[in-house]
Each structure stands twice: as C-alpha cells, then as structure tokens.
Image (spheres, rainbow, N blue to C red):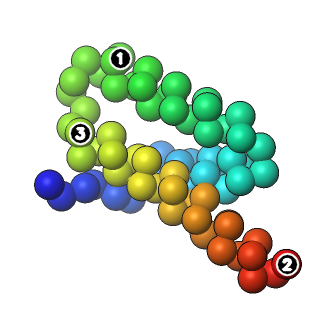
C-alpha cells in the first residue's frame, strides 16, 4: 500500500502538532482524537492511505524535533 504523505494543506499542521507534542503530550491526544473524528465524520470517504499518512507526517515532526533536541543537548 502506498501512503499519501504531504498531500494536502494540513500536512504542515500535522508536522507542527508533532513538534508541539514533544513538549506537551496533550497535543498527541488531541491529534489522535481529531484524526479519529475526521475519519468518522468523512464516513470512510478518506482513504486509509491518507489516514495513515497523517500519522506519518505527525511522527516526522515529532522525530525531527527529537533529533534536533538530542543534538543540541
């Protein structure tokens, strides 16, 4: 299965939320509930590849800030 990553305007927001969740974990909870709510609201119109791609974008932001933070400290 091919994931759709960085395919919409919200891709940047997913990365930003990933960065913010490194510093405050409530952003992760909000992101997960948002994604589940979006998937339910769209009633299956969103492909699973887009759904999983959003999580990859989130993890990209989280991983990038974690890597930079480790290099600085």
Residue 67 % position (x, y):
66, 74
- Of the numbered discs 3 and 2, the one sitting upstream in the chain is 3
Q: Earlier in the sequence, mark 1 or mark 2?
A: 1
Q: Do the residues labelled 3 and 2 touch (CB within 8 Å)?
A: no
Location of the N terminus by quadrant is bottom left
Q: In this view, does 26 lie to the left or right of 9?
A: right
Q: Can residue 4 be seen in this view?
A: yes
- Residue bearing mark 2: 73
Q: Give the distance between the C-alpha atoms of the residues marked 1 and 2, in whole angstroms.
A: 42 Å
Kindly state the secondary structure of the residue where label 3 is placed. Answer: helix
Residue matched to label 3: 48
Q: Is 33 left or right of 44, judged from the image as shown? A: right
Q: Is mark 1 on a helix, strand or loop?
A: helix
Instruction: Give whichever of 22, 35 is nearer the camera.
Output: 22
Extreme residue in the right direction = 73
Q: Residue 26 carries which label?
A: none
Residue positioned 23% across, 39% down in the render: 48
What residue is rendered at 56% in x and 35% in y? Answer: 31
Dot 2: element: loop
**Residue ID for mark 1:** 41
Measured from the top left, where is residue 54 in percent x and y? 41, 47
Looking at the image, how many numbered discs can be counted on the residues?
Answer: 3
In the picture, measured across the screen, residue 18 lies left or right of residue 51, that is right
Q: Position of residue 21 (x, y in %)?
A: 68, 47
Q: Which residue is drawn at 68% across and 66% down?
A: 65
Other residues around mark 3 within 10 Å, as few (<14) / some (14–19) / many (≥20)? some
Q: Toward the viewer: 38 or 23?
A: 23
Q: Report the Cα–Cα distance between label 3 and label 1.
A: 14 Å
As measured in the structure, the alpha-carbon distance from the residue carrying label 3 to the one carrying label 2 is 37 Å
């Amino acid at each position: 299965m091919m994931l759709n990553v960085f395919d919409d305007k919200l891709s940047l927001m997913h990365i930003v939320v990933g960065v913010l969740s490194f510093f405050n974990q409530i952003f992760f909870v909000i992101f997960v509930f948002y994604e589940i709510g979006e998937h339910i609201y769209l009633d299956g119109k969103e492909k699973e590849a887009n759904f999983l791609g959003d999580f990859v974008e989130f993890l990209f932001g989280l991983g990038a800030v974690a890597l930079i933070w480790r290099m600085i400290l």
